[in-house]
Image (cartoon, rainbow, N blue to C red):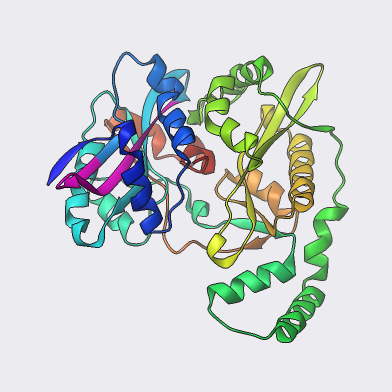
Amino acid sequence: MKIREVQIKDYIQIKELHDKYNLKILDKIGWSKFWLQNPCMKNSQNTFPMGWVAEENKRIVCYLGNILKEYYHDSKRFIVVCSHSWISEANYRLQAISLLDRFFSQKNVDIFTVTTANKISEQIFKRYDAKKIPFQNYQKPMFVVLDMEKLIYSFLKYKKIPLAKFIRKLFFYFSYIIFYKKLNFWKKINTSKKVELNSTIDEKFDEFWEAYKINFQNQFLQSRTSNWIKWHMQNRIANGKAWIMSVSENNKILGYAICSERNNEKIELKRIALIDFVSLKDNQEVYISLIKNCIEESKKRGYHIFEIIGFKDLKRRIFSNFKTFNRKLPGFPFYYKSRNNIHDNFLKLGETWDPSLIDGDSFL
């Protein structure tokens, strides 16, 4: 068994591993660009691996990606790595632990994060002294239903409950009557700000980021320069799987929202998620206008549900005003490990965090 760093030429075998376990992966060009154009990697004086693979007779049997990011807190810059797509063939699960050894032993890293843990893997991450972020609501997504009939169909498919089309229709009509007010409440919410669907990511986003970073120095913030947003989202926006909406005044951005597709093809569920949601001084009028317009855009594009995962309590309270439905994830997804106790002093505080899917690998 050989453990080594990932190379671009490994794509075909890594894709085969993803396909075997029904996991999504970018096409070869998109995947290569993602790893090679990471702004943090391009600007770093240190070298960081794209991840690791375990090989048996030159056949890749385990994989773990390693996403390099930069964060800020109290005007200080932090190097953060986020694990991505930890996969192993069934007979090599023990060997896959060696990839985690490599991940958590990296030098020149301040903080390690895992954002897709499940009930089984979270027990393994805890052995590396990884801790849950101090934000229990991250386990409780909120969502607006945009197509109840399609959602019911997906739910029945998930539960493997075969029902005749006529029975499904009755189930839909019954549910729609019960939840009529809740399903349509978002349409009645008034907005006060003009919202724009952005076609370009330009220097206005850099100006916004500098102001936002000053506004929220006490929070642990992932970089949001225009280069970082392009790296995260441009491929998905170009493919019609994401969009950015913003509110501006006097040619300056006051806030923006990023939505990204997170479909579940197995059950034919079309789902869009709000993965980033920011405003200077937490302007609630801006937030309400952005949410309403994002929901309208989601409805127009034919999505069945509009979902948020994470976000600090203030943002969740605003979103709850739209009369959302709620669910609970089976495991807690988001863990972190700090290299020293000084960082732990602020990371253990709930007010430090405003976590969302943008902190993980949702853009892949």
Report the number of discs.
0
User: Which residue is painted at 53% across and 32% down in the image?
Assistant: 232
Asked whether 57 falls inside the magenta stretch, the response is yes
Q: Position of residue 231 (x, y in %)?
A: 52, 27
Residue 217 percent coordinates (x, y):
53, 24
Q: Is residue 244 above or below residue 312?
A: above
Q: Could you tell me if residue 355 is visible in this image?
A: no
Q: Residue at x 48, y 53 (%)?
A: 136
Q: Is residue 307 left or right of residue 86?
A: right
Name the magenta segment's main secondary structure. strand
Query: Residue 233 in the image: x percent, y percent?
Result: 57, 33
Q: Residue at x 76, y 84 (%)?
A: 170
Quarter-of-image position of residue 241: top right
Which quarter of the figure has residue 99?
Answer: top left
Q: Nearer the viewer, residue 17 or 340?
A: 17
Where 148 falls versus 283 (above or below)? Answer: below
| 96 sits left or right of 242 in the view | left
Q: Nearer the viewer, residue 154 or 348?
A: 154
| Left or right of residue 106, residue 332 in this image | right
Residue span colored magenta: 53-70
* Residue found at x 25% / y 62%: 90
Farthest residue toward the left? 1
Where residue 110 sits in the image (x, y, percent)? 32, 28
Does 40 appear above or below 128? above
User: Is residue 75 rendered magenta in the image?
Assistant: no
Please indicate, yes or no, whether residue 311 appears anywhere in the rendered image.
yes
Q: Which quadrant holds residue 343?
A: top left
| 21 versus 80 height, above or below | below
